[in-house]
Amino acid sequence: MQILRYLWALPATLLGLPLVFTAKLTGGRVRMRDGVIAVSGGASARLLYPSWFHQGGAAMTFGHVIIARDEKCLYQSWNHERHHVRQFEQWGLLLIPAYWLVGFVLWFRGYDPYLDNPFEPPPE
């Protein structure tokens, strides 16, 4: 069954692979952990810093790829991001539009598109 989960999440994982290579080429750390490619630092981590269009974050998941700002962020957000890996194994690439659609509906109704999003795991 695990191979089917990897295959179902593969399109999302492929979206994350260019970020893995970019991070590695720019001094980031890349390793395998629990069947996931874990990346910290490097140029890819710049996507997670706050900008004019988003608040930023500690880490982000694409299928079986987790990108984190740095080692501390990777450590602190590991369980949270593993939750998203499991969601990609269930939803495949459909998770991305589903997440954004739910977030938009929440925002439109006056809720927080991140904190109130049911795709986000409850705080530990």
Image (spheres, helix red, strand yellow):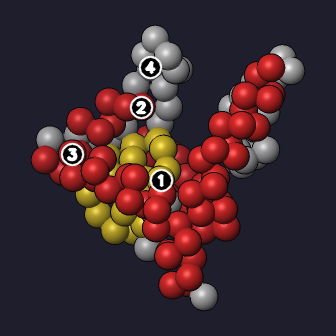
Do the CB atoms of the residues marked 1 and 3 lie less than 8 Å apart? Answer: no
Residue carrying label 4? 50
- Find the distance from the CA under tag 2 to the CA under tag 1: 13 Å
Disc number placed over residue 62 in the picture, else none? 1
Mark 4 is surrounded, within 10 Å at the Cα level, by few (under 14), some (14 to 19) or many (20 or more) other residues, namely: few
How far, Cα to Cα, is label 1 from label 3? 15 Å
Residue appearing at x 56%, y 82% in the figure? 4
Vertical side of 2 occupied by 56: above or below? above
Residues at discs 4 and 3 in contact (Cβ within 8 Å): no
Q: Earlier in the sequence, mark 4 or mark 1?
A: 4
Report the Cα–Cα distance between label 4 and label 2: 7 Å
- Give the mark nearer the N terminus: 1 vs 3: 3
The amino acid beneath tag 4 is Pro
Residue found at x 42% / y 31%: 48
Location of mark 3 (residue): 22
69 or 106, which lies in front?
A: 106
Tell me residue 96's x, y (percent).
Answer: 60, 47
The amino acid type found where label 1 is placed reads Phe
Q: Which mark is residue 48?
A: 2
Mark 1: few/some/many CA within 10 Å (<14, 14-19, 20+): many
Q: Position of residue 42 (x, y in %)?
A: 23, 40
Is residue 114 left or right of 105 when viewed as pictured?
left
Q: Considering only order in the chain, which callout, 2 or 3, is on the residue closer to the N terminus? A: 3
Residue in the image at 47% along x and 42% along y: 59
Numbered disc in front, either 2 or 1: 1
The residue lying furthest to the bottom in this view is: 1
How crowded pointer 2 is (Cα within 10 Å; few <14, some 14-19, many 20+) is rated as some
